């Protein structure tokens, strides 16, 4: 049975996805009220969480507890000496007001991994899922703070009261994490109760806190882990430095001595910036991040056994499609076409380039209708190969 697919459109429905990307992403809070408590039922349920906590032998810090009213709470209160979670004591701490946090559970629950992969395919940024269980009675896991990554909050069950404040650091980098005492909390800008089925998007840097109401609360925090223009610029400078020895010179002798005359060093600095601007390779730097993302998205080949069993009777009338949320790169030279995906490469003769690209990009296709120069036997061979490699699935 095919699992339900989750993507950006479904996540923020009915708000238009293109308007979100152009106007809200990294810029502005979005609150979607649905009045549909079961909206996320196919994505996650309390039984899924209980099963993970009691049967998957999870360890700290995959599972942690936070309690703003109990700052001395340590992992020893709910783990065995090995770090393995002691489910009985974990739930006791939960009953005493502690919030359970399951970090990056997409590695254990296929529905959450599908969600992350779908969002990664859309945004070209990494995503992760953390899950928060908060007991009723005004419990608060974390004090007022901001995150250094954007988050989509998906309310699974119960309600949670969110209060948002100002943005002391706009779009903070990962190294600009919140420091208690360093950032003052201003006046609230938005207060709301997030109900089951609702969604709240909070850009990084926005101060916020959240507490339970008279109900236990469960929500997913879908976090965006972006590569920024800062990352790209640093990569570009590093690439120039590999070919330009002037950038590899030591800083001036005595620069740290009191009274050092900085005028000549300041001129050198401006000169080096000019050399970087002149030589920086934007495409090479961007390719670095694209290739890193593509090569580290390992395959999720659900149903692959049945796919392989169907190959012996594959016909030209069969239909196929790219694997959902497939990230890949195609390159070609004078003789061959190469597809990179899942950390590996697949190379074919150049005359297979057109049908190969069609098979990897068409929403759905009939095997016999593949375009290009391949004969019927060649089309069958190509599709069999792509299915075996996990790039394409038969429908």
Image (cartoon, rainbow, N blue to C red):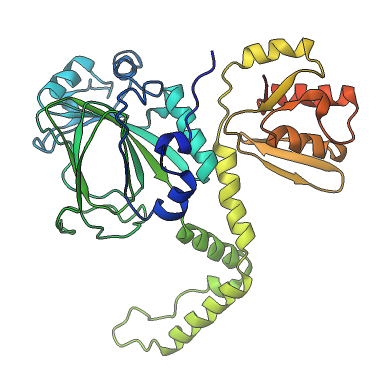
- In the picture, measured across the screen, residue 306 lies left or right of residue 90, that is right
Q: Is residue 242 above or below residue 309?
A: below
- In the picture, measured across the screen, residue 255 lies left or right of residue 248, that is left
Residue drawn at x 48%, y 74% as measured from the top left: 250
Residue 164 seen by the camera: no
- In the picture, measured across the screen, residue 244 lies left or right of residue 213, that is right
Q: Is residue 28 above or below residue 200?
A: below
Residue 275 seen by the camera: yes
Q: Position of residue 29 (x, y in %)?
A: 32, 49
Q: Quadrant of residue 84?
A: top left
Residue drawn at x 41%, y 42% as measured from the top left: 15
Q: Is residue 14 above or below residue 183?
A: above
Residue drawn at x 42%, y 55% as measured from the top left: 23
Q: Position of residue 13 (x, y in %)?
A: 41, 37
Q: Looking at this view, is 304 or 166 the one in front?
A: 166
Residue drawn at x 39%, y 52% as measured from the top left: 24
Q: Quadrant of the N terminus?
A: top right
Q: Position of residue 321 (x, y in %)?
A: 68, 27
Q: Quadrant of the C terminus?
A: top right
Q: Is residue 368 above or below residue 337?
A: above
Q: Quadrant of residue 303?
A: top right
Q: Quadrant of residue 129?
A: top left
Q: How many marks?
A: 0
Q: Looking at this view, is 266 or 204 the one in front?
A: 204
- In the picture, measured across the screen, residue 101 lies left or right of residue 300, that is left
Q: Position of residue 132 (x, y in %)?
A: 26, 30
């Amino acid at each position: 049975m095919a699992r339900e697919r989750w993507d950006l459109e479904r996540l923020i429905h009915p708000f238009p996805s293109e308007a979100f990307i152009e106007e809200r992403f990294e810029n502005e809070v979005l609150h979607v009220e649905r009045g549909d408590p079961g909206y996320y039922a196919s994505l996650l349920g309390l039984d899924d969480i209980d099963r993970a906590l009691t049967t998957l032998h999870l360890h700290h810090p995959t599972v942690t507890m936070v309690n703003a009213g109990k700052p001395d709470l340590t992992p020893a209160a709910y783990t065995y000496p090995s770090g393995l979670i002691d489910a009985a004591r974990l739930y006791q701490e939960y009953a005493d007001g502690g919030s359970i946090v399951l970090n990056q559970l997409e590695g254990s629950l296929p529905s959450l991994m599908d969600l992350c992969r779908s969002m990664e395919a859309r945004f070209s940024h990494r995503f992760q899922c953390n899950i928060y269980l908060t007991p009723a009675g005004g419990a608060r896991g974390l004090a007022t703070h901001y995150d250094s990554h954007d988050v989509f909050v998906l309310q699974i069950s119960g309600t949670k009261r969110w209060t948002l404040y100002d943005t002391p650091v706009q779009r903070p980098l990962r190294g600009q994490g919140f420091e208690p005492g360093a950032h003052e909390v201003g006046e609230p800008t938005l207060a709301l109760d997030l109900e089951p089925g609702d969604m709240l998007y909070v850009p990084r840097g926005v101060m916020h806190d959240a507490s339970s109401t008279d109900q236990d609360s469960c929500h997913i925090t879908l976090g965006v882990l972006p590569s920024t223009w800062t990352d790209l610029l640093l990569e570009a400078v590093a690439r120039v430095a590999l070919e330009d020895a002037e950038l590899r010179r030591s800083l001036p002798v005595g620069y740290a001595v009191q009274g050092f005359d900085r005028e000549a060093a300041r001129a050198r600095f401006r000169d080096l910036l000019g050399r970087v601007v002149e030589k920086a390779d934007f495409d090479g730097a961007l390719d670095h991040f694209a290739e890193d993302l593509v090569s580290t998205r390992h395959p999720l080949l659900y149903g692959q056994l049945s796919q392989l069993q169907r190959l012996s009777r594959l016909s030209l009338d069969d239909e196929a499609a790219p694997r959902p949320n497939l990230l890949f790169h195609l390159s070609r030279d004078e003789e061959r076409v190469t597809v990179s995906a899942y950390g590996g490469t697949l190379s074919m003769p150049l005359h297979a380039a057109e049908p190969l690209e069609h098979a990897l990009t068409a929403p759905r296709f009939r095997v016999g209708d593949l375009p290009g120069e391949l004969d019927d036997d060649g089309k069958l061979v190509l599709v069999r190969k792509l299915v075996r490699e996990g790039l394409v699935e038969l429908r």
